[in-house]
């Protein structure tokens, strides 16, 4: 695969005020837009660049995930998300993220075995949960529990030791379903269910969510497959807010458990991880198909505060490739559960039809995204709204860990230190308290 290169390509920046010019190398990746290497810009010019939200700034070099938002393409290590979701289980995708290649049979078996035997939590973590209020949000519990793992697993905290990093990576990926399921159980007052070594990753999570000590619980294979696919679709998505948070925290040398806890906290924000909940609330607000026209009209009105949720994306200016897979998965789940008439799904399908045919949506490139259907799937499976974002965190932990490992191994890695455009007060003289007006 073609790596990053600098091939006789430069960009010249001219300051019209002083007449001075500076030339910087243009770098090419294996695919996607070129970037301008401005690492010496401040040293050369005495100026900073200004880019709120980092919309035009590349913060790192990465080989994990590639997105072409204009074409609606999502690749993990070069593999299209559609092929991975159709042909792999989540453990294979996790292996791919961490190692750069899909596993052979022996590697897959060993990786699944290693994850399986890391799924249990230290027994004292069990009592850690009782320190939270019963009505605590599961994301609050997950932030605390994941951050606390560093207090229980001292033997894998040396980030400069490859074996320590591997053990910590496996522990986090393996234990996050247990942490999430226990957060749910704690919120509803049911006893915790321990992981089972005879179940796969997605099956184990569903078992810990819904089983009780009172009777046997058989995981529905169709629902387990749907959950597995949902985890794959959310496994990584390049340098988004939570991934950048993990990298920034990790750049200081923080331990991996603290870094992933930071990522969970970032994901908790409604502008990042809460979109599928917002979609579900919107569909409920619309209420019926005959009211869709009214709400679409409101969405087009700049003076109306109503917004159609689940449409458009910060990166994608085409159909989110994950949305098509999620749509199919949604139908499979509803058929399996015998849900023939689902008002929310009917509204969602009609909204999708409008979005793909209406000139307003086409011109603004407002296509359904991955969050558009996931809330309906979760609701059909009996997953409460408070668990929507924890599920997202469960899936994304694999991507966070892969990104963290890549950052630690990058010889160019240095502590993150964004600069600013200062607009506050300049130097002024101190006034004693009694003389202040």
Image (tube, grey):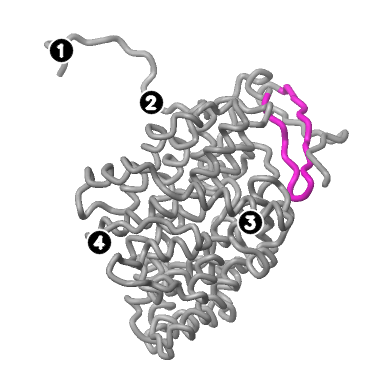
Q: Is residue 420 visible?
A: no
The answer to whether residue 150 is magenta is no
Which residue in the rendered view is the most extreme toward the left?
Answer: 434
Q: Which residue is mark 1?
A: 433
Find out whether the residues at labels 4 and 3 contact each other: C-beta distance under 8 Å.
Answer: no
Which numbered circle lies on residue 424?
A: 2
The first of marks 4 and 1 along the sequence is 4
The answer to whether residue 25 is magenta is yes
Of the two numbered discs 4 and 3 in the rendering, the one whose residue sits closer to the viewer: 4
User: As rendered, which of 241 and 161 lies closer to the eye?
Assistant: 161
Of the two numbered discs 4 and 1 in the rendering, the one whose residue sits closer to the viewer: 4
Q: CA distance from mark 2 to mark 4?
A: 52 Å
Query: Which quadrant is home to the C terminus?
Result: top left
Q: Which residue is mark 4?
A: 190
- At x 65%, y 18%, the residue is 43
Q: SS at mark 1?
A: helix
Q: SS at mark 2?
A: loop
Expressed as whole percent of the image width and height from the top left, the position of residue 27 reads: 77, 37
Callout 3 crowding tier (Cα within 10 Å): few <14, some 14–19, many ≥20: many
Q: Which residue is mark 3?
A: 93
Callout 2 crowding tier (Cα within 10 Å): few <14, some 14–19, many ≥20: few
């Amino acid at each position: 695969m073609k790596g990053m290169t600098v091939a006789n390509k430069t960009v010249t920046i001219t300051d019209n005020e002083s007449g001075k010019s500076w030339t910087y190398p243009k770098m090419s990746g294996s695919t996607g837009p070129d970037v301008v290497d401005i690492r010496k810009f401040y040293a050369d010019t005495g100026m900073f660049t200004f880019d709120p939200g980092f919309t035009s700034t590349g913060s790192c070099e990465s080989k994990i995930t590639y997105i072409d938002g204009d074409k609606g393409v999502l690749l993990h290590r070069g593999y299209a998300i559609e092929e991975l979701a159709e042909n792999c289980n989540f453990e294979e995708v996790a292996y791919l993220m961490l190692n750069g290649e899909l596993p052979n049979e022996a590697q897959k078996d060993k990786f699944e075995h290693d994850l399986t035997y890391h799924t249990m939590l230290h027994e004292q973590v069990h009592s850690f949960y009782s320190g939270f209020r019963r009505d605590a949000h599961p994301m609050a519990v997950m932030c605390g529990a994941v951050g606390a793992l560093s207090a229980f697993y001292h033997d894998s905290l040396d980030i400069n030791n490859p074996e320590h990093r591997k053990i910590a990576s496996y522990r986090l990926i393996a234990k996050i379903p247990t942490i999430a399921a226990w957060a749910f159980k704690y919120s509803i007052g049911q006893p915790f269910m321990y992981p089972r070594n005879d179940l796969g990753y997605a099956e184990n999570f569903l078992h810990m969510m819904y089983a009780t000590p009172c009777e046997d619980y058989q995981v529905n294979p169709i629902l387990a497959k749907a959950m597995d696919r949902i985890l794959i679709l959310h496994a990584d998505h390049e340098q988004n807010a939570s991934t950048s948070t993990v990298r920034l925290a990790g750049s200081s040398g923080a331990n991996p458990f603290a870094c992933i806890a930071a990522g969970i906290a970032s994901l908790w924000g409604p502008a990042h991880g809460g979109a599928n909940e917002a979609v579900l609330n919107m569909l409920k607000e619309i209420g019926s198909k005959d009211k869709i026209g009214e709400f679409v009209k409101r969405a087009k009105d700049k003076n109306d505060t109503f917004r159609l949720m689940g449409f458009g994306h910060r990166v994608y200016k085409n159909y989110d490739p994950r949305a098509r897979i999620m749509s199919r998965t949604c139908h499979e789940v509803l058929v399996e559960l015998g849900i023939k008439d689902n008002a929310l799904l009917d509204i969602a399908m009609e909204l999708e039809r409008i979005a793909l045919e209406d000139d307003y949506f086409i011109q603004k490139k407002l296509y359904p995204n991955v969050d558009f259907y996931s809330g309906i799937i979760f609701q059909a499976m009996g997953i409460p709204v408070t668990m929507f974002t924890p599920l997202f965190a469960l899936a994304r932990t694999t991507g966070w860990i892969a990104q963290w490992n890549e950052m630690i191994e990058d010889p160019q890695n240095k502590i993150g230190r964004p600069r600013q455009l200062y607009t506050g007060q300049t130097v002024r003289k101190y006034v004693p308290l009694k003389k202040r007006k």
